[in-house]
Image (cartoon, rainbow, N blue to C red):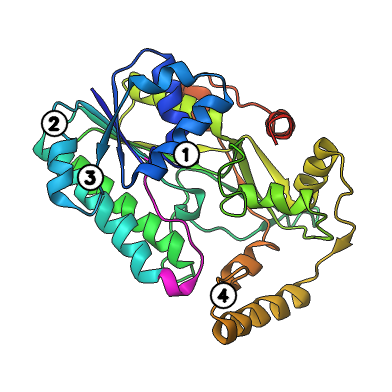
Amino acid sequence: MILVTGATGLVGSHLVLHLAEKGRNVSAIYRNQASIGKTEALFKMYDKEHLFANINWIPADINDIPSLEIAFEHIEYVYHCAAKISFDPRDEEKLRKINIEGTANIVNFCLAKNVKKLCFVSSIAALGDLPEYNFNQENGELTPKITDEETDWNPEKPHSDYAISKYGSEMELWRGQQEGLEVVIVNPGIILGAIPKSWNRNEGSFKIITKVAGGLQFYTNGTTGFVGVLDVVKCMTQLMDSDKKGNRYILVSENLSYKNLTTLIAANLNVTPPKKEAKRWMTKLAWRWDWLATNLFLQERNLTKAVAKSLHTKDFYSSAKIEKELNFTFEPIENVISNIAEKY
């Protein structure tokens, strides 16, 4: 039996659908009945509603030990997708509680219940740090530095609370491995995928789609890695079905600038792409105003200092390891965006 945490989120819901299509016996944990409805809506979106009844739903929370005791009965394999994603400094305690302590609980139960293998969804945010470019003294050219699985984490550099929490989560996985648990970690880039209309389209990575559809005017030239959610779940299941263990794998289809990404989204949605570049000084002012508005009007943060900085940072990632070891080919982001637009 397979257990999936976070089965009502973007990755988890696509994962349980993928496993159901493969005829696997799947248990999934949930915190409230409404969240199950989210996953059921996703099954309907893909015309796979008939498979939804095959999922064994168990009320549980990764920070609630008694409920996990029930959820782990007869479990052999675990996909840990549950996490809190936030770049709001006010969520530091929640990030640590859910992402680090919650993951520690999952690892402990896997060890106690003799689970055969655990797959954890981390993030490229938990990877090491590199300068943006190498300087070639011979020709004076700048070439991008590529982050891979061997890039070291630098604790001296500033990191968002989210990144620190995901790095801390990974430490729990490696602890589990030292205690005898077979583990594998995936580090996806920004995950893009279609979601039902009933989902909140103003949160997570889908917020990019919503903003462009609504007439986004500004772009930035920062660069990062992107990947389709279907590729993420395919990589996860292939890794779990293989003899791979004790390793991490970067999952990035393409490294794109935000300008190129938003232009691509606009083209597929038949809307006007962003025309104006948001300079660094503009986003510096914007996140400060957002902080002030948040404190004055008690609203949610829309732009934090960490996010503003990332919009201008040029990060490049290599997925060569998983492409070689699994002979895996990622779907081009253009195709991913096209599929999202069809279901928008």
Residue 230 in picture, x, y percent from top left:
55, 28
Name which of mark 1 and mark 4 comes first in the sequence.
Answer: 1
- Which secondary structure is most common in the magenta stretch? loop
Q: Determine crowd level at label 3: few under 14, some 14-19, many 20+ residues with C-alpha closer than 10 A.
A: many
Mark 3, residue position: 106
Q: Alpha carbon of mark 1 to alpha carbon of mark 4: how far?
A: 25 Å
Q: Alpha carbon of mark 4 to alpha carbon of mark 3: how far?
A: 33 Å
Name which of mark 3 and mark 2 comes first in the sequence.
Answer: 2
**Residue type at numbered disc 3:** Ile
> Is 256 above or below relative to 247?
below
Q: Are marks 3 and 2 in contact (CB under 8 Å)?
A: no
**Which residues fall within the magenta stretch?**
81-91
Name which of mark 3 and mark 1 comes first in the sequence.
Answer: 1
**Residue type at numbered disc 1:** Lys
Q: Alpha carbon of mark 4 to alpha carbon of mark 2: how far?
A: 42 Å
Element marked by disc 1? helix
Disc number placed over residue 73 in the picture, else none: 2
Mark 1, residue position: 38
Residue 87 inside the magenta-drawn segment: yes
When asked about the image quadrant of residue 95, the answer is: bottom left
Q: Are marks 3 and 1 in contact (CB under 8 Å)?
A: no
The mark lying in front, picked from 4 and 3, is: 4
Residue 136 in picture, x, y percent from top left:
73, 54
Element marked by disc 3? helix
Name which of mark 4 and mark 3 comes first in the sequence.
Answer: 3
